[in-house]
Amino acid sequence: MKRRLTRFAWAVVWIVGIVPAIAQAGPAERLAEAVRFRTLSHQDPAALDAEAFAGFHAFLERTYPKVHAGLTRHVIGDWSLLYVFEGREPELAPILWTAHFDVVPVIDPSAWTHPPYEGVIADGYVWGRGTLDDKAGVIGMLEAAERLLAEGFQPRRTLYLAFGHDEEIGGAAGAGATAAWLQERGVQLLFSLDEGFAIVDGALPGIDGPVALIGVAEKGYLTLELVAHAAGGHSSTPPRSTAIGRLAEAVRRLEANPMPARMDGVVGSTLDAIAPHLSLVPRLALSNRWLTGGMLESRFSEDRAMSAMIRTTTAVTMVSGGVKENVLPSEATATVNFRIAPGDTVDDVVTHVRRVIEDPEVEIRVDRGTEASPVADVESPGYRLLVSTLGELVPEAPVIPGLVVGGTDSKHYAKVADDSFRFTPFLLGAGDLSRIHGVDERISVSNFEGLLIDFYVALARAADGI
């Protein structure tokens, strides 16, 4: 009898205590557990840790039972996930929320206040790689869906939740394959919502308090190789310029002659939205760019972040050439990375490079390139929905459209979405931006459990009105 009671007691402990422990914990604890799965993206896809990704899938299944019972789940590209929350009126254009659960490696774990993969909750924060980029998005969306299902909610429009596994290396096998899956089935989205910007405090000079930045476009990507050719030989009888010298001159010319700035398009929309919130003099300057454009361009070009907003950027990232100190190289190579602003194209950049270098002995090779994204419409129903939802939750934060200078999975969904927006609803201070891909990545518990999850719940409900 004693043994039976002991076994029964253990069974009660297991059923009542251990199995639902995750469900009884709060959202922050569930995010912390998500961080503990080392779902790292490596440049070599073969280095993917299948056990970590499979473990993460299993964690989601046991943690969000209503989502996995009420939504249809598809596994795409081996590891990416697509959930379908069927709408009451399936003939309406659906909506897509997307995030990714792969993370970048940590260079020096010892530099962190708390170990980067242990999901420590301390000092009011969840610490660890992925808390900002972008497991908070994944877990936040699933928390919202689980809450909505518990309340018996069914969206008017079908809602897709897409979670990529390889965004940090371009997203081709995840979001790219998911977009193709949607396209093959004739799905055309009203809009997609991905990571990109956030609610930032102290990020815009002249505006006190938080600002909600919504990415309405993202830059394209182009990598060129510049290959300078010259006769080789012994270093004791050099020509006036070696292959390395010729390459150095080409690099100097490129850096001295950046692509032209653009004060219209996305940048113009950003400046127009910022102007009303500034004091008189800067407001007049931004509102009268026909007169002040040259001065603004000069001022913006002095700041790295602002310069990246107004033009296609040029960055020389790798150089190689020569094999021995007394041997003239016959070839020297520089790798140059460009982030292409909307309004410029890959061909525009190549033409610019060829014109600026103006040296037939420097070969220009296109490594890989993608065009800048389409620009989302700030008058569209999707953008107005985001603005109104933010107005309910953070009325003190003006909403500003902007250009995302990095890359997101949205570039894949542009072909199946009328508009694509890039925004995650968490509040960041100026010092938090360096934590993304950096040391001590973290998110406050109140930020995650309150604002972020509440935003997705409110957004789903508000979407019934469009």
Image (spheres, rainbow, N blue to C red):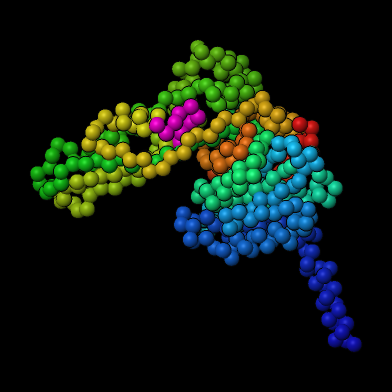
Residue situated in front as seen by the camera: 294 or 65: 65
Residue 105 seen in the figure: yes
Q: Residue at (65%, 22%) from the top-left corner?
A: 277
Please check the rendered image and state whether residue 342 is part of the magenta-colored stretch, yes or no: yes
Q: Quadrant of the rendered structure where residue 154 is?
A: top right
Q: Is residue 442 left or right of residue 230?
A: right
Q: Is residue 77 left or right of residue 21?
A: left
Q: Residue furthest top?
A: 291
Q: Position of residue 208 (x, y in %)?
A: 65, 29
Q: Is residue 274 left or right of residue 63?
A: left
Q: Quadrant of the rendered structure where residue 189 is?
A: top right
Q: Quadrant of the rendered structure where residue 20 is?
A: bottom right
* Range covered by the magenta-colored residues: 339-347
Report the number of discs: 0
Q: Quarter of the image containing the N terminus? A: bottom right
Q: Position of residue 58 (x, y in %)?
A: 68, 62
Residue situated in front as seen by the camera: 357 or 433: 357
Q: Position of residue 463 (x, y in %)?
A: 76, 36
Q: Is residue 83 above or below residue 344?
A: below
Q: Residue furthest front?
A: 185
Q: Residue at (45%, 24%) from the top-left corner?
A: 261
Please check the rendered image and state whether residue 60 is part of the magenta-colored stretch, yes or no: no
Q: Is residue 63 above or below residue 247?
A: below
Residue situated in front as seen by the camera: 267 or 178: 178
Residue 444 seen in the figure: no
Q: Residue at (69%, 61%) from the top-left corner?
A: 59
Q: Is residue 384 above or below residue 168?
A: above
Q: Is residue 290 left or right of residue 159?
A: left
Q: Quarter of the image containing the C terminus? A: top right
Q: Is residue 51 above or below residue 235?
A: below
Q: Position of residue 428 (x, y in %)?
A: 63, 40
